[in-house]
Image: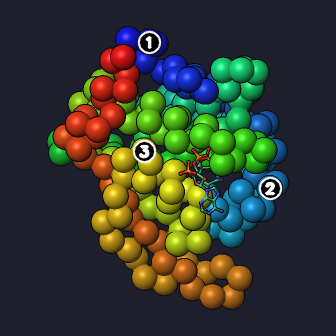
Amino acid sequence: MKNLFTGELVCLGAPMPSIDAPLFSKWSRDTEYMRLLDTDPPTLASAKSLQDEFEKRLEDQTGHVFRIHTLAESKQIGFVGLFGFDWANGNSWVGIGIGEREYWGKGYGTEAMTLVLRYAFTELNLHRVSLGVFEFNARAIQSYTKAGFVVEGLERKFMNREGRRWDIINMGVLRDEWMKTYKGNFEK
Ligand SMILES: CC(C)(COP(=O)(O)OP(=O)(O)OC[C@H]1O[C@@H](n2cnc3c(N)ncnc32)[C@H](O)[C@@H]1OP(=O)(O)O)[C@@H](O)C(=O)NCCC(=O)NCCS
């Protein structure tokens, strides 16, 4: 088996708050990215406040957040992270963002998600990973479907964008389902 956190296009790296914070701050200035990522209206995040937040998260161990690096250029293009752990029931949530938008739609996100699901199911022993995605984010929904998620429901008219209401689509993937379909890909 290859390195646990390495695929064909990307590898996942451990967080480094002092390096990550300026990048996240830069990405927060891309309103289209923020509009796809978060229910809050786009706001600018200072590198200083982000660094404090990331350092606290590392200390508290409240999430497992990874940097996404391209293998070809070793460039940091985004993040993927597991959070909201419910250890008694083996559940968690996942979030992902590729801040460097020239890398959208080229397979990087799906592979990063596949790597983090492998970690979730084969190392952390989780049974289920959930996410929420906005109904207008067709690229993300397609990427998640390719990574093994299925639509489980929706929260109707949950959020406000451009003066109208939008649904949040709930998607989830179970370990048994994922193991059947994807685990073999890593054993070739
Ligand atoms: C969502 C995200 C992580 C997906 O990663 P990605 O690398 O762009 O996705 P991939 O290239 O692996 O897969 C995208 C799929 O959607 C398709 N796609 C691309 N643009 C699309 C669009 N506008 N509408 C529908 N499908 C689209 C691609 O063709 C591909 O499917 P295919 O391989 O079957 O052809 C990334 O686009 C991103 O970070 N976007 C900005 C922030 C965001 O949306 N975060 C998620 C919040 S829930």
The quarter holding residue 163 reads bottom right
**Residue under the image location 72 percent in, 41 percent down:** 103
Q: CA distance from mark 2 to mark 3?
A: 26 Å
Q: Which mark is residue 147?
A: 3
Q: Secondary structure at mark 3?
A: helix
Q: Position of residue 115 (x, y in %)?
A: 45, 30
Q: Position of residue 33 (x, y in %)?
A: 71, 56
Q: Residues within 10 Å of mark 2 (few under 14, many from 20)?
A: some
Q: CA distance from mark 1 to mark 3?
A: 19 Å
Q: Which residue is mark 1?
A: 2
**Residue under the image location 30 percent in, 66 percent down:** 152
Q: Quadrant of the C terminus?
A: top left
Q: Which of pointers 1 and 3 lies earlier in the amino acid sequence? A: 1
The quarter holding residue 19 reads top right
Q: Which residue is mark 2?
A: 30
Q: Quadrant of the N terminus?
A: top left
